[in-house]
């Protein structure tokens, strides 16, 4: 396995601590250029402004959800192998779709969420319906020079707090998406160049704001599920390492406060 892909013990420790792994210039060359051009072409010719809310809640470019050039960002770049190392010896379910997210430029009227975790109490779904997963991997397709350009903001180590809340005050069907004090957090912006990658534990709270720059901010996201996620989705909200058997020993050696 190349050094480009292989995770170190430090990488694993940092992921346990923060719930986030970032790889700069991970996807490059024709693979990145073809995927970016595909989405840019859709934005020029297929984007329907009246569908903005549906796009934002689900995916932009739904016609491209299973396009091989976009799936290759995950399957052919080495990103699938990075994910596999985080879950090892467990196996991920196959990834067959991509979510495209575009923050439309010049502060266009577009839904902006507070801190949340995906698939829990989604405003556009029944609160009792869970659409959770194990982790998410995002590939930057367009540059993001500053946070005001519609950056993804994440809360490092927030997965520890979320697991505590899911284990205590929360129950399925609750309307709240996060415990008190989390929703208002500003978070850390993911400032990136094309080809940069962020891999994030499902329980890490995140949000995204308006894009006041003149260009779209575009990312391709892949939602990865443990192969048996559907059998223990609620338990995985309460135990952040249930689906990461290879990381449990690291987590057990350190309390949240010790990091």
Image (spheres, rainbow, N blue to C red):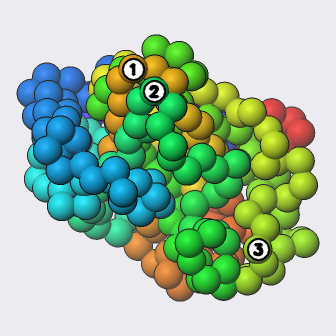
Residue 241 percent across, percent down from the top left: 65, 59
Q: Is residue 209 left or right of residue 84?
A: right
Residue 175, placed above or below residue 110: below
The residue where tag 1 is placed is 214
Residue 51 percent across, percent down from the top left: 36, 59
The residue where tag 2 is placed is 106
The one nearer the camera, 222 or 164, is: 222
Tell me how far mark 1 sits from mark 2, CA to CA: 5 Å
Tell me how far mark 3 sits from mark 2, CA to CA: 32 Å
Res 153 → quadrant: top right
Q: Secondary structure at mark 3?
A: loop
Q: Secondary structure at mark 1?
A: loop
The residue where tag 3 is placed is 175
Q: Nearer the viewer, mark 3 or mark 1?
A: 1
Residue 200 percent across, percent down from the top left: 54, 45
Circle nearer the N terminus (3, 2):
2
Q: Secondary structure at mark 2?
A: loop
Q: Are marks 1 and 2 in contact (CB under 8 Å)?
A: yes
Q: Are marks 3 and 2 in contact (CB under 8 Å)?
A: no
Q: Is residue 208 left or right of residue 36?
A: right
The one nearer the camera, 184 or 213, is: 213
Badge 2 local density, few (<14 within 10 Å), some, or many (20+)? some
Quadrant including the C terminus: top right
Q: Are marks 3 and 1 in contact (CB under 8 Å)?
A: no
């Amino acid at each position: 396995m190349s050094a480009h892909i292989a995770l170190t013990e430090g990488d694993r420790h940092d992921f346990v601590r923060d719930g986030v792994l970032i790889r700069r210039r991970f996807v490059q060359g024709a693979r990145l250029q073809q995927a970016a051009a595909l989405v840019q072409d859709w934005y020029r010719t297929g984007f329907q402004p009246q569908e903005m809310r549906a796009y934002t809640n689900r995916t932009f470019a739904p016609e491209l959800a299973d396009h091989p050039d976009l799936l290759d960002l995950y399957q052919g770049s080495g990103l699938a192998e990075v994910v596999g190392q985080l879950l090892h010896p467990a196996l991920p379910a196959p990834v067959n779709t991509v979510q495209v997210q575009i923050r439309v430029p010049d502060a266009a009227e577009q839904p902006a969420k507070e801190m949340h975790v995906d698939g829990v109490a989604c405003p556009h779904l029944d609160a009792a319906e869970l659409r959770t997963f194990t982790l998410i991997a995002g590939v930057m397709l367009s540059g993001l020079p500053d946070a005001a350009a519609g950056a993804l903001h994440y809360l490092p180590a927030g997965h520890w707090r979320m697991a505590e809340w899911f284990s205590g005050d929360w129950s399925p069907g609750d309307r709240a998406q996060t415990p008190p004090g989390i929703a208002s957090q500003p978070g850390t912006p993911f400032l990136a160049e094309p080809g940069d990658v962020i891999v994030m534990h499902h329980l890490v709270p995140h949000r995204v704001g308006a894009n006041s720059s003149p260009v779209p901010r575009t990312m391709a996201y892949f939602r990865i599920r443990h192969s048996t996620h559907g059998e223990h989705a609620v338990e995985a909200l309460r135990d952040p390492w249930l689906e990461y058997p290879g990381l449990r020993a690291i987590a057990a050696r350190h309390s949240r406060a010790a990091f």
